[in-house]
Amino acid sequence: MSEKQQIPAESLMAWLDGELPEEEAAAFEELLGKHPEWREEVASMSAIVQATSRLQLPPPPARTWDHYWEEIDDRISKRFGWGLLFTGSMILISIGVWKVLHHTEDMWVKSGLVLVVLGVIALFAGVLRARIRELPHDRYRRIRK
Amino acid sequence: MSSDPPFTPEEETRLVVRSKRGDRAAFGVLVEAYKERAFLAALALVQNHDDARDMSQDAFVKAFRALDRFESDRPFFPWYYRILRNTCLSYLKHHGRGRMVSLDQLVEEKHVQFPDNRGANDPRQQLQNEEMTAHLREALGKLKPKFREIIAMKHFEEMTYEEIADALDLPPGTVMSRLFHARKALAKLMEKHRK
């Protein structure tokens, strides 16, 4: 006994959305003509496509665009600034550590520097730990930028 | 509306190349051209106006910083959409869905003006359309998120199959079959509402 042939879903979608090249659309329409049993499904899908096409997300209120680009520009500048600050701080801390270890005997300076370095390490480790803890549960980790 | 490219591909490539060199004015032109599409795409995901504005801006900032990894001759928006989607999903994961308004409450019917009054003369047809739209809005709110997303991309953001495939990192065939199953699920839900 032959199984009932299913309508080719991909072609049906492309045909309804007008994404089928002319020749393929003609071939698909010919195929539809040969399968009257598909008529109900085609009509139902066509009705859904038409009804969905009548819906839209409302245009955003005009105030949405007040300072829109300026705020983006500002955020780009800030991130750049933070980047510079972080890199500069790392360079200064490294030089400071080296100098203090090799040229200073003052215990207060040495202790202060050790605390700064430990603080940076602790903060970095905290961020890293949170990320590692979160990673196995992150459903979106495979999403590439 | 949204699927009409605001530039020729060559113009867009030139703007991207300039932006990659750090030209903020060029990037500003890209933002200006795509901001409405970006906002609506974010709105479909986070379903809140303020968050959608914020997420779309944040994604533009991330895009600017990641431009080095972007191939200049590719269309900008699908690539940007991936960043936006990631930004919105990560936001929802950390902040929950408390501020969300259901998508069916956000969408509205297009006010299409027919020059020759087609349709306006047939009140029965109009009533039928209104009824169907109401059922559809309700059904949309009940769809699985991945189905709702693809319907929003196709109909509210008016993306082509190629753009959707690029943005979701899926083969075009999968886009079509997901759309088929999404529409089938919509039809089923609407049928249930009608009964």
Image (cartoon, coloured by chain):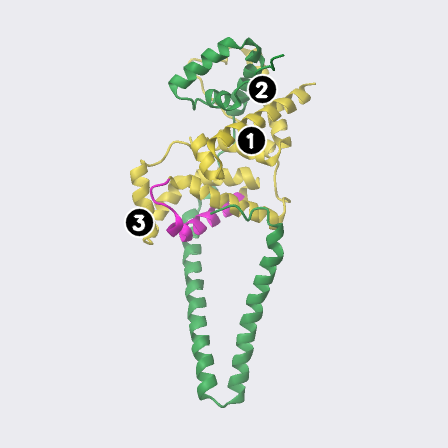
Chain appearing in green on the rendered image = A
Q: Work out whether mark 1 precedes mark 2 in sequence or the reverse, and give the earlier one.
A: 1
Relative side of B97 to B76, left or right: right
Q: Residue at x 51, y 85 (%)?
A: A109
Q: Colour of chain B?
A: yellow
**Name of the residue lying farthest toward the bottom:** A105
The magenta stretch is: B52-74
In percent of width and height, residue B31 lies at: 39, 44
Residue nearest the observer in this picture, B56 or A95: A95
Is residue B61 inside the magenta stretch? yes
Q: Is residue B170 magenta?
A: no
Q: Which residue is tagged 2?
A: B130
Q: Nearer the viewer, mark 1 or mark 3?
A: 3
Pointer 1 residue: B107
Q: Which residue is mark 3?
A: B18
Q: Position of residue B63 (x, y in %)?
A: 43, 49
Vertical side of A31 occupied by A93: above or below: below
Pointer 2 local density, CA inside 10 Å: few below 14, some 14–19, many at least 20: some
